[in-house]
Structure formats: C-alpha cells, structure tokens
Image: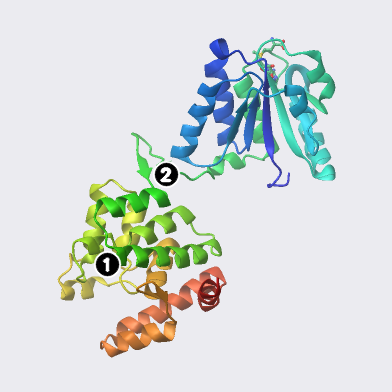
C-alpha cells in the first residue's frame, strides 16, 4: 500500500454516555496506527478535547470531528469504504483485494466501525464488508488488526514524535520531554535570555532545521537543540557556557538527547584532552548524533544573527590562533555533507536569499 494514502475512521452510532471510553480507544488506536483522523456521528466535545490533548503532548495532527453526517462522510470521493463487521468477508481473503483496489484507484480508505446496531446503508455503501474472525469482538481490536495488515506493520516503527516521548524500558517508566519551538522560547524567556541571544538562536534554528529537513534527522530535536544551545550564555559567556547550559536543561528535566546537543555544540566539539586543558569537567564533548552535528555546525555558520561562509569561520578561528579547531570545523562540514548528500553552502545561500 502507498504510504501516503490517508486512512480515516468513521464511527457510527456513538452514544456519548455509553461509548465515550470505547470511542476514545478507537480514536487513540487509529491515531497510533497512523490514521489521519476520525469522524464521529454524534457531537462529543469531550472526546475532541481528550484527543487534542494527546496530540499536544505526544505529537501528530490526528483530527477528531464529531457531530457530522455519517452518510455524507461515507460518500466522500477518493476513498474506498471498508466496513468492519463480524458478518463480513474474512480479513485474510479481503486485505489483498483492498490493497489492490486502492493501488489501482489511488484512493485513501475510510474504515467504518459501529457502536450500536449498524444501519444497513453502511453495508451497502461499503466497497468491502470485512470481518476479523467471524466472532463478536471489540471494534478496537478489529480496527487494530485491519490497520496493521493494511500498513504492513509500520505502526510498530512509532513514527509520531511529540513533546512527550516514551523511552522504552525493560522495567519502569521513562518519558522524555522534547519542548516544541514555543516552549523553547518560553524556557529562554524564563531564564532571562537577552535579545542578542534570542536573535542568534532563532537564526541558528532556521539554518539547522533547513539542514535537518534534507537529512532525515529528528526535526524536533534539532529545533529544540538549536533554540536552546546558548541557554548557558544567560549565566556565562565563557568556554563553559555549553556545560552550564546542559546543567540548566538537566535541572529542567529536558530530554537528554537535547542536553547532549547543547553540551556538545562548541566549535566542532571538544575532546577529553582539550576539555582538561580548558578546565571543563573532563569528558569528550564531540558531537556524535546527526542532530548534535547539525546544530554545532549551524552555530558555527551563524555569527550574531548573520550567516557567514565556512571560509569566514575558518579565518575567524585562525585569527584567534585556533588552527586545529578550524580544521575540525571543516571536517565536520564535510562529514555532514557526506552523510546527508547535501551542500551546506547552498542551503546557507538559499536561506540568505529568502
Ligand atoms: N451490535 C452491532 C451490530 O450488530 O451491528 C455491533 C456492535 S459491536 C460491539 C461494535 C463494532 O465492532 C461493530 O460495528 C464492528 O465495527 C466491530 N466488530 C465487532 N466484531 C467484529 C468482527 N468480528 N470483525 C470486524 N468488526 C467487528
């Protein structure tokens, strides 16, 4: 099945009092399995708000529209209609046909699930009436199994990325906090970041996210790392500002992936030996992940709030007698370009011309 084809859910017969829990679970399951949204026939602002709040915390843009005319949705053009019903044809005989029909027509899919007794028009309007076992089961499990088969298990890749990210653990619970752009600006304000810092980090964010978008990097980590990389400058402008910034963010329980971006952003990184010489806590501050590398290099290429060329960066370092560090910056630039198959200079020029 084509990955970009939309899957929408149509829930009919929803009774807010009786079904609020199960309809919420239908929506949550659809969202986690990659559907774009759900239509619910009866108006239910509580479910709308609950799912909105899940989106805010855990990411994605899954929509919930309640109080709609189900017949209208079921006649939407450009979508195959698949009705889940225990009276339908077995899933194992149908799933291939659905994928084939979809491929041929280039359609999305509307999956119809019932709550109370489903009206007959739903059977008639559907291209496929599908049964997951010919036994009565829950609509949540029927939906999950159908979607899993339609998208060939891709839901297991956990593609939705939000502010709260569950860190899988063998035992215990851990949730990472990746603030979005707005939250990062609030964090900077709360730490009394100057206008100068704000102007600089906003430009670094623009450049870093432009590079990241061509690099298959985690955009939200890059955005937060870029916006917060100089938070340590609210307390010191010394060489230790990255370490201080990391401390501030650890105290605020920000994701360790962002803390590392901040801690490792100085130049093209600082080795353990250099760190000892500079009086920093002794450890290796070399950027490791692609997100760490991108933010460090975007920072190198932004002076104040202006983008400068790699040659200018090298010149500035040489003028300060930091010849070795300038070589590392050139190597980091080459490395990112190679990993991502891009020209950083071209991305800089495009941004300047915007
Ligand atoms: N009593 C209702 C009827 O007869 O139309 C069905 C109620 S059932 C609890 C709610 C929904 O679960 C159904 O509308 C259907 O979408 C889904 N469902 C239940 N068992 C199913 C099965 N074996 N295969 C596919 N869907 C099923």
Q: Quadrant of ligand 1?
A: top right
> Which residue does the numbered mark 1 point to in the structure image?
284
Q: Quadrant of residue 244?
A: bottom left
Seen at 46% across and 33% down, the residue is 53
Nearer to us in this view, 58 or 269: 58
> Which residue does the numbered mark 2 point to in the structure image?
163
Residue ranking furthest to the left: 279
Q: Quadrant of the C terminus?
A: bottom right
Q: How many marks?
A: 2
Residue 119 placement (x, y as % from top left): 77, 13
Q: Is residue 172 above or below residue 218?
A: above
Nearer to us in this view, 196 or 299: 196
Residue 179 in view here: no
Q: Is residue 270 left or right of residue 352?
A: left
Task: Characterize the local packing of mark 2: few (<14), some (14-19) or many (20 or more) Cα atoms within 10 angstroms.
Answer: many
Q: Is residue 28 left or right of residue 78?
A: left
Q: Is residue 128 above or below residue 334?
A: above
């Amino acid at each position: 099945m084509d990955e970009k084809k939309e899957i929408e859910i149509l829930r009919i017969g929803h009774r807010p009092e009786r079904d609020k829990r199960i309809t919420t679970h239908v929506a949550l399951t659809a969202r986690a399995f990659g559907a774009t949204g759900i239509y619910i026939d009866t108006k239910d602002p509580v479910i709308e708000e609950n799912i909105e709040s899940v989106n805010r915390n855990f990411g994605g843009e899954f929509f919930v529209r309640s109080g709609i005319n189900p017949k209208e949705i079921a006649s939407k053009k450009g979508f195959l209609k698949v009705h889940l019903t225990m009276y339908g044809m077995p899933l194992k005989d149908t799933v291939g046909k659905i994928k084939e029909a979809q491929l041929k027509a280039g359609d999305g899919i509307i999956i119809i699930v019932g709550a109370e007794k489903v009206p007959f028009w739903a059977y008639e309007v559907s291209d496929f009436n599908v049964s997951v076992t010919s036994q009565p089961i829950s609509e949540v499990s029927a939906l999950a199994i159908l979607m899993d088969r339609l998208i060939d298990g891709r839901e297991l890749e956990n593609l939705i990325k939000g502010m709260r990210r569950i860190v899988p653990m063998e035992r215990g619970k851990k949730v990472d906090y990746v603030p979005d752009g707005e939250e990062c600006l609030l964090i900077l304000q709360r730490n009394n970041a100057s206008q100068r810092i704000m102007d600089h980090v906003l430009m670094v964010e623009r450049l870093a996210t432009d590079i990241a978008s061509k690099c298959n990097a985690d955009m939200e980590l890059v955005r937060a790392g870029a916006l917060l990389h100089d938070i340590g400058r609210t307390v010191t402008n010394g060489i230790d500002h990255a370490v201080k910034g990391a401390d501030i963010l650890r105290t605020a329980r920000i994701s360790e992936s962002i803390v590392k971006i901040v801690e490792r952003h100085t130049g093209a990184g600082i080795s353990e030996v250099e760190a000892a010489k500079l009086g920093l806590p002794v450890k290796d501050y070399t950027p490791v992940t692609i997100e760490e590398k991108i933010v460090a290099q975007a920072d190198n290429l932004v002076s104040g709030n202006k983008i400068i060329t790699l040659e200018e960066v090298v010149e500035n370092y040489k003028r300060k007698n930091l010849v070795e560090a300038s070589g590392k910056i050139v190597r980091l630039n080459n490395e990112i370009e190679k990993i991502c198959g891009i020209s950083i200079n071209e991305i800089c020029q495009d941004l300047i011309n915007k």
